[in-house]
Amino acid sequence: MEEIRKNVADNIAALRTSCGMTQAQFAEKLNYSDKAISKWERGESVPDVTILKQIADLFGVTVDWLIAPHGEDDRPAAAEAPSYRRHNELLISLLSALGVIFVAAIVFAALLIAGVPHAWLVFLWAVPLAATDLLVFNAIWGVYRRNFIFISVMIWTFLAAIYVTFGVLLGAWELWYIFFFGLLLQCATVFWSGIRVTK
């Protein structure tokens, strides 16, 4: 058991450093504390099987590889996979957000042909929808640090869309006070982003 503990510790540390990841960045991807990562890499504790599988998937290796001994020259080529994976995840997220804008363009064209006034408001609403889309994909990929940015963009663009829509369509420009809700939501987001998970 002691040998397996040492192998896991050495392999996790080697894979993490080979990808240029800090313990904090690695911890964020697994939704664990950096203290837990530090204990794993010192061999003081071993992640449970589900976390070992998650780590193996993250680095493109098998669980068997994580628990086996390896020399310095025995690092899998798959250890470079996370950089490609992050690149692909970013492109998929951006393509999805672009899809929202594309749908907005189609709706805009249809409204324009139908002679609906203020059809450009569709693009205004596409921005918070695209931010929501990015937030969902970001949560799927597990890059929680960016959630704060996407939630903030979503809050303020959604409120701006409401304000401008009511102002243009109903002349209700006095609804500026809805931005106070934005301040409250932004404060809640700041506090929420400060919560640290310890496992």
Image (cartoon, rainbow, N blue to C red):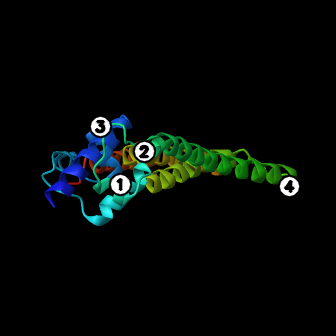
Q: Quadrant of the C terminus?
A: bottom left
Element under label 1? helix
Measure how far apart labels 3 and 1 are at the Cα level. 21 Å
On residue 114, the disc is: 4
Which residue corresponds to the image point at 29% horizontal and 54% vertical from the top-left?
A: 68
Real-space Cα separation, disc 4 to disc 1, in angstroms = 61 Å
Residue, disc 3: 22
Q: Nearer the viewer, residue 68 or 106?
A: 68
Residue tagged 1? 65
Identify the secondary structure beneath mark 3.
Answer: loop
Mark 4 vs mark 1: which is more N-terminal?
A: 1
Q: Please give the residue where the numbered disc 2 appears in the rendered image.
A: 76
Q: Amino acid type of disc 2?
A: Pro
- Disc nearer the start of the sequence (3/4): 3
Q: Position of residue 146 (x, y in %)?
A: 41, 43
Residue 113: assigned label: none
Q: Residues within 10 Å of mark 1 (few under 14, many from 20)?
A: some
Q: Which comes sooner in the sequence, label 1 or label 2?
A: 1
